[in-house]
Amino acid sequence: MKKINQNKWNDTKASGGEFDKLPAGAYICVIRSVEDVPDREYLKIEYDIADGKYKNWWLDTQERAGFWGGTLYRSYKEKALGMFKGFTEAVEKTNDGFKWNWDEQALKGKYIGLILNYEQFLNKDNECKERIYVKSVVNARDIRAGKYNDLKLTVKELKDEDKDKLADAEQTKEENNYEELQVGEIPF
């Protein structure tokens, strides 16, 4: 094993592997990058928290854990135009002088208000997990002024069919016979 520099080791805070979770709520965010996916007709928008206690949350997560979690997808398919227009109008209202001109790269560096919440999902191993998602896109000025809806931000639970899959997966795990690992007595 590679030996870690002693000063780095001494300055490292011990962790049990769990990380703090960004609380559900209303945030003023900045758009960091935008990618057009024309064959699927959507924009992939990476954002970060721009203000307050959680400023640069996703940048810090990227540096610490190696992934960017602040991603918003906005479809511009015909059936989703209302939501797309709501998004562009929220960006326009938040950023003085900005007018949506169909250049997605012009969105970089612009501010937006996002209401973030959590939802449950089944991963590929049929385990119930939680992830953050954008519940609403709003004018960031309304967040600053406290004028956004008083939303009840509770975890959006699994759909019934996913609950059934989860129950089946848990039953299968219980039915499998695993060899019990023999270890000595726990010394505490």
Image (spheres, grey):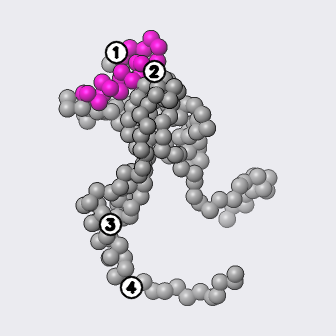
User: Residue shown at 59%/42% (left/top)?
Assistant: 60
Residue extending furthest top?
Answer: 97
User: In screen coordinates, is 39 left or right of 141?
Assistant: left
Task: Establish if 178 lies above or below 79.
Answer: below
Task: Establish if 58 lies above or below 126.
Answer: above
Disc 3 residue type (three-letter): Leu
Q: CA distance from mark 2 to mark 3?
A: 42 Å
Q: CA distance from mark 2 to mark 1?
A: 16 Å
**Disc 3 crowd, CA 10 A, few/some/many (<14, 14-19, 20+):** many
Is tag 3's residue or tag 4's residue first in the polypeptide sequence?
3
Residue extending furthest left?
Answer: 79
The count of marks equals 4
Secondary structure type for disc 3: helix
Is tag 1's residue or tag 4's residue first in the polypeptide sequence?
1
Which quadrant would residue 153 be assigned to in this image?
Answer: top left
Which of the two marks, 2 or 4, is nearer to us in this view? 2
Disc 2 residue type (three-letter): Thr
Is tag 3's residue or tag 1's residue first in the polypeptide sequence?
1
User: Residue shown at 65%/83% (left/top)?
Assistant: 186
Q: Position of residue 177 (x, y in %)?
A: 39, 85
Is tag 2's residue or tag 1's residue first in the polypeptide sequence?
2
Is tag 2's residue or tag 3's residue first in the polypeptide sequence?
2
Q: CA distance from mark 1 to mark 4?
A: 61 Å
